[in-house]
Image (spheres, grey):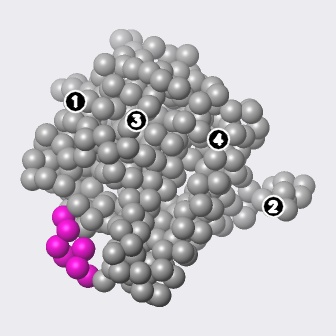
Amino acid sequence: MRLTLAYGDNRLIGHVNDDSVESVNAALALAVELGRENVYPGRGETAELWAALAHIAALDVGTARIVEPHLDALAILNEADATADTERTWGVFASEAPGTTLVAHESATGWTLSGTKQWCSLASRLDSALVTASGQLWAVDLHDAGVSVDDGAWHARGLVEIPSGPVTFSNVAAVPIGAPRWYLERSGFTWGGIGVAACWYGGAVGVARAVFTAAKKRPDDFALMHLGAIDEQLESARLALSDAARLVDEGAPVRVVAKRVRSTVARTVEDVLARAAHALGPAPLALDAGYAKRVADLQLYVRQHHAEKDLASLGRALTEQDAPSW
């Protein structure tokens, strides 16, 4: 595995200082560096790839939030047998938010996109993006004069350096990637969703390490109880991710597995955050900038899981099978 990272790698840390511009620059540089390795899920190194994402998130959630979509975009392009410029920074804008519409138009000179796309993370800082519109995936140059980014709509207290507001496209040149609906129907769609869960897991590990350190210093019964429960949850999530990686590399169908793993990891994250709050009290949230940032970032990031809605989706997928696996 060429994509290796050492624990405590300082390249992954920087979002807790006051220079968010430089922090994002460092994260983007790391994303490009890792993207050059051409390590994609489903090719025998999925576990190592997801472990690397988890490791990054354990050190800094914001860095993982920048690196993961860049690597996902390159994996999508590879799956589509499309040429990818690995020296450009990439995003994936695939949210279909109500109230906004992005439409593709064909002319004599090619395809263009016009309209608005919500939830476009870091659009003002990226070079390129894969964007869904009119049932198709498109590659666009975010430096096109027709791209207008509204970073001012981002008021979050977590991931503050990664604005994910709307982007308006006005006759922006677009290159189709794959066939219509290919983006949603391809195997890699579910793989990418598990990769995001690996980042959530890593963020929870970062929070858990603070509980471990506190329990080592003052091992009262309540701190030890919370630490034990956190360990149980994290190990279950880790095993779920590890098993999913094995299935991906074996070429097994993982549509249901992906939904299950994401729900497992999301529940673990929420429980770790709650137990850490009970075990540590308000002090680190108020006085430790790194810890407070990690918690705020992770709370927002894990909301990419749609809670009960995604559990209902899992249940629906199960009923479409002849029998469950248990």
Say whether residue 272 is magenta.
no
Q: First in sequence: mark 2 or mark 1? A: 1
Asked which secondary structure carries label 1, the reply is loop
Question: Residue 202 versus residue 182: which sits nearer the camera?
Answer: 202
Quarter assignment of residue 302: bottom left
Say whether residue 283 is magenta.
yes
Q: In the image, is residue 205 above or below residue 42?
A: below
Please tell me which residue is depicted at 31% across the width and 19% down the height of the picture: 87
Q: Which residue is mark 4?
A: 245
Secondary structure mostly seen in the magenta stretch? helix
Q: Which residues are magenta?
A: 282-289
Quadrant of the snapshot with the C terminus: bottom right
Q: First in sequence: mark 2 or mark 3? A: 3
**Residue 163: x percent and y percent?**
24, 50
Q: Which residue is mark 1?
A: 146
Q: Which residue is mark 2?
A: 319
Q: Is residue 294 visible?
A: yes
Give the mark toward the camera: 1 or 4: 4
Quarter assignment of residue 16: bottom left
Under mark 1, the amino acid is: Gly
Under mark 3, the amino acid is: Leu
Structural distance between the alpha carbons of marks 3 and 1:
38 Å
Q: Residue 2: which disc?
A: none
Q: Which residue is mark 3?
A: 5
Please tell me which residue is depicted at 66% across the width and 58% down the height of the picture: 260
Give the mark toward the camera: 2 or 1: 2
Structural distance between the alpha carbons of marks 1 and 4:
40 Å
Structural distance between the alpha carbons of marks 4 and 2:
24 Å
